[in-house]
Image: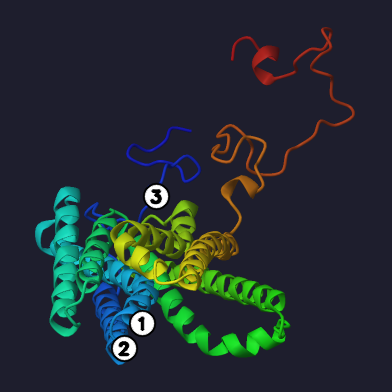
Amino acid sequence: MTKQPGRVPAAESDQPAVDATPEGRSAPAPGAAVLALLTLGWLAAMLWSTREAITSAAEGITAISLSAFALPGVISAALVAGAATALAFGNLLSRRYGDSITLRFVGAIGAGMLVGLAAALAINLTYFDTSTTNVIAGTTAAAAIIGGAAAGARTAPAVGAVVTAALGTLIFVVAFSRARDPLFNLFGAGDTQQSLVDAAKWVSRTESLVAGLLAGLLAFGYLTWARRRALRRDPSAAALRWPAYLLAGAGPGLLLLLAEVIIRIGGRSLLDLASALSEADAVAQTSLGTSRVDNGIWVLFVGALTALIAFGRTLGPTPDDEPISANGPDAAPDPTAPVGPVETADAGESDPADPDAVDAGPARVDPAR
């Protein structure tokens, strides 16, 4: 059958990996403005709690130690806040000036810089003027800029899913701290040092596992919501493929690992000061760093697997699974084929394959016709 020009069969079409608007532009991330407000509020809460912990402690040794302990939470919050603000700003630029990749990336970096400068200014104005203040301010600003640059990707819904899942993971980690003591007793923490170490290991694994499950479910839920909104705008919009769900589920773990890299590079001087206080502080800083890396890896793989499994359960049968007719799935009916029931030859009629058979048709019996 001759195919109609300008149309491609569904089984042969090569759909893009991102949602598209009718004008061919990439779909915006829904709820980006709300995400920006929530993440900025979370960053402000982390900065405030860190300041309260430092100012309530004695000057000198305790303040340095508490600053080192609070730095990972501030850096993670700055990464997510920079990414969410850049995402909202990118949506605004796309609506006003079109979907330019260069403009979106530059705007994302600019939004991250604004968040980073605002956070650094707040730290310098509200924290005590110590040797650790500039380290916290500079590292926080760098984290916000890096988060903004990461949000400059073209697939905005996937970035929004990563930000949503990462914010939910960070909130869960803070809330989970209230359940640590009961879990320590549940996992057999006793009076010996070995029992405490084993219980702490199982508590950390439980936290990472639940955080990864939450990250994967939040990423899948956000992408499902974004897909429904895109379909309401354009019923023919192409759907996100499985790599987008895989990346969205793994995104929170990637952000946690990226935050650890920023901490070890930008906050190296603060970590060294805290480790030099005593042998116990050095062991604590090393143990906490290893725990953060393990937590990021667990969240990465569990979140990616959870989002991918949730996406796979939504898939229906493909066109290849449908029954195929003898003439092919797209074959047209034969115009020469009889429409009604096929008449069979009577037993008394001559066999057409017999050479002695004579056609008794009227045209051959009477040559004059």
Marks 2/1: CA–CA distance? 6 Å
Task: Please state which amino acid type lies under the numbered disc 1.
Answer: Thr
Between 245 and 183, the one lying in front of the other is: 183
Residue at 52% x, 84% y is: 176
Q: Secondary structure at mark 3?
A: loop
Rendered image coloring scheme: rainbow
Q: Residue furthest right?
A: 347
Q: Is residue 101 visible?
A: yes
Where residue 326 sits, quadrant-wise, is top right
Where residue 136 sits, quadrant-wise, is bottom left
Indicate left or right for 350 with 240 as reference. right
Task: Please state which amino acid type lies under the numbered disc 3.
Answer: Ala
Classify mark 1: residues with Cα within 10 Å, few (<14), some (14-19) or many (20+).
some
Task: Please state which amino acid type lies under the numbered disc 2.
Answer: Ala
Mark 3, residue position: 17
Residue 30 image point, x, y percent:
30, 71
